[in-house]
Amino acid sequence: MKLKPYILIALLLSGILLDSCKDDLDIGAQGALSEQQLLNRAGVDALLTGAYAALDAQQYTNGAAQNLSGTNAWEASPTNWVFGSIAGGEAHKGSDGSDQPGIDAIAKFTADPSNSFFNSKWRSLYEGVNRTNTVIRVLAQVPEISEADRANLNAQARFLRGHYYFELKKMWNNVPWIDETTPSAEAPLQTNTENIWPRIEADFQFAYDNLPATQPEVGKVNKWAAASYLAKTYLYEKKYQEAKTLFDVVVAQGITTNGLKYALTKRFEDNFDAATENNSETVFAIQMAVHDGTNSIANGNQGDMLNFPYGDSPFRCCGFYQPSQDLVNSYRTTEAGLPYLNDYNLHPVKSDQGISSNQPFTPDPGPLDPRLDWTVGRRGLPYHDWGYHPGAKWIRSPGQTYAGPYSPKKNIYWQATQDIYSDQSVWAPGTAINYNVIRFADVLLMAAEAEAQLNNLAQAQTYVNLVRARAADPINYLKKYINDNNPLAGFSTTPAANYKIAVYPAGAFAGMGKAGALNAIYFERKLELAMEGHRFFDLVRWGIAQSTLNAYFAYESTITTDIRGANFTANKNDYFPIPQRQIDLSNQNGTSVLTQNSGY
């Protein structure tokens, strides 16, 4: 069973005990329930459930779509669709220019510290930190828990705290560390000048050492999720040998919380379908649920509620999160089935930009990576079992000029199972599709990166080829419908496009050299993990954000109007600005405790 819905107790804790709507770092217990009332096993379990509940950064507030900071649900989405994918050039904001302009500023790197998205994300993540700290502090005061259970509970809390701080670190770099030993009154006085990577390492190491291999509830974390996250932390720190050593163990021995050996699923799309999730590829997923009794979608991907086709589509709202032409072009392959690593935009994929839905259009006939059509909705191709994507009729901007002609797909539920896995109780859809923070394909590509950095190019190629081989299996080719007039009848055996993809031939990475192999790995991450919120953070840690994003702006601005004038400045835009609200609240005797990031 899932650990969702995190309702009732978790909501009680977020609203009363943990005071989730406070606007600063003074986030200690404030309400009718005191920690003394929770000094028992049931209290600890409830607190831990609340710490898990903060993963989706959402809350139920009388039907309003809000995140844990009490603002718009989408401003703190755990999928990082704004901060990772849009800022990383995988997608446009979508909709039109007047709707959620704060996202436009983030996409163009013109956002200043007053942008509400930054404060919402900051507050929601620190709410998660506070909840984990409360678990750790209360647990230490409950004597009747066995040592084995105590280690497990403590390790789960520290894993979650490591996750929340990892998110804070990659977003802002300079953030204050607050743990269970920090008195509530002193939380706002903590500076953000310490490098907290060692503390994040320590939390994941403790989790790895103390978590069991399996858990009774699939939504809980296990030792192999902790090992994977610790190895990811090493990779971000450029500790490549430490990362490699741990990835070796994870790949060879890792299993899921529900006891499945880590492996790529046979079907790529099974990672984005609520009916097939928590599978062998799941390392750490945020559990989503619908029809949970709240008459809301707070537990159902509420942070992504805007990200469905618009117009006369069956999804109602709201036309955001449109994949970029640059991303689509990345899936063009050579006649040998390999990607154009350096000049993919010179081989563009045909689009229906500027063509109305009542005008004829024939999709691109050239060779393509099949992952394109499980990631991007494009005209003339099956959009799951909803029919063929009609193009402009589903795009909010007239003529598709603002954000292009494409729709997102990995977040879309299927028509045949919509009654089970979607929720229409509010003005935009909710879904039960989990968000994979880390899946095994990600682990393999991170392991490949560590190997390449250590000049182990043959092993790096082996890992990349595992990912490409899965994509190359014809089972992953999107098929045409059996009956075009009845998509629910299923799919035929005829591929929907000209799919051609191959693994790299023996010795290819060695022939490219270290720099070329890394380039191939970076590109593979773009193809495999597109629209999953990783791209911007990858570009920054690789040190190529300025060159990659400014090239993206130059190309994409010839197609759409939304990002014209955008520019990325290295050593400034690598991290987002510390929210001005937090700097103001940290003022002590006329001096702010928090230091703003460079350039803002």
Image (cartoon, rainbow, N blue to C red):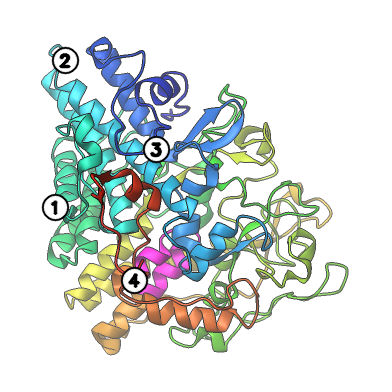
Gap in Å between the C-alphas at discs 1 and 4?
24 Å
Nearer the observer: mark 1 or 4; the answer is 4
Alpha-carbon span between mark 2 and mark 3: 30 Å
Distance (Cα) linking label 4 and label 2:
46 Å
Quarter that holds the N terminus: top left
**How busy is the neighbourhood of tag 2: few (under 14 within 10 Å), some, or many (20 plus)?**
some
**Amino acid type shown at disc 1:** Pro
Left or right of 159: which side holds 269? right
Task: Read off the residue under disc 1.
Answer: 198
Viewer-proximal residue among 121 and 549: 121
How far apart are the two marked residues, 3 and 4, measured between alpha carbons? 26 Å
Question: What residue type is disc 4 on?
Answer: Lys
* Image marks 1 and 2: residues in contact by CB distance under 8 Å: no
Check if residue 526 falls in the magenta segment.
yes
Whether residue 25 can be seen here: yes
- Circle 2 is placed at which residue position? 142
Choose the circle earlier in sequence order: 4 or 2: 2
x then y, percent, for residue 507: 28, 84
Image-quadrant location for residue 247: bottom left
Which of the marked residues, 1 or 3, is nearer the chain's N terminus?
3
Q: Amino acid at mark 2?
A: Val
Instruction: Specify the label residue 572 is tagged with.
Output: 4
Q: Which residue is mark 3?
A: 23
Boundaries of the magenta span: 522-539
Earlier-in-chain disc, 1 versus 2: 2
Element type where label 3 sits in the image: loop
Element assignment for label 1: helix
Give residue 396's position: percent from left, percent from top: 74, 60
Give SS at disc 2.
loop
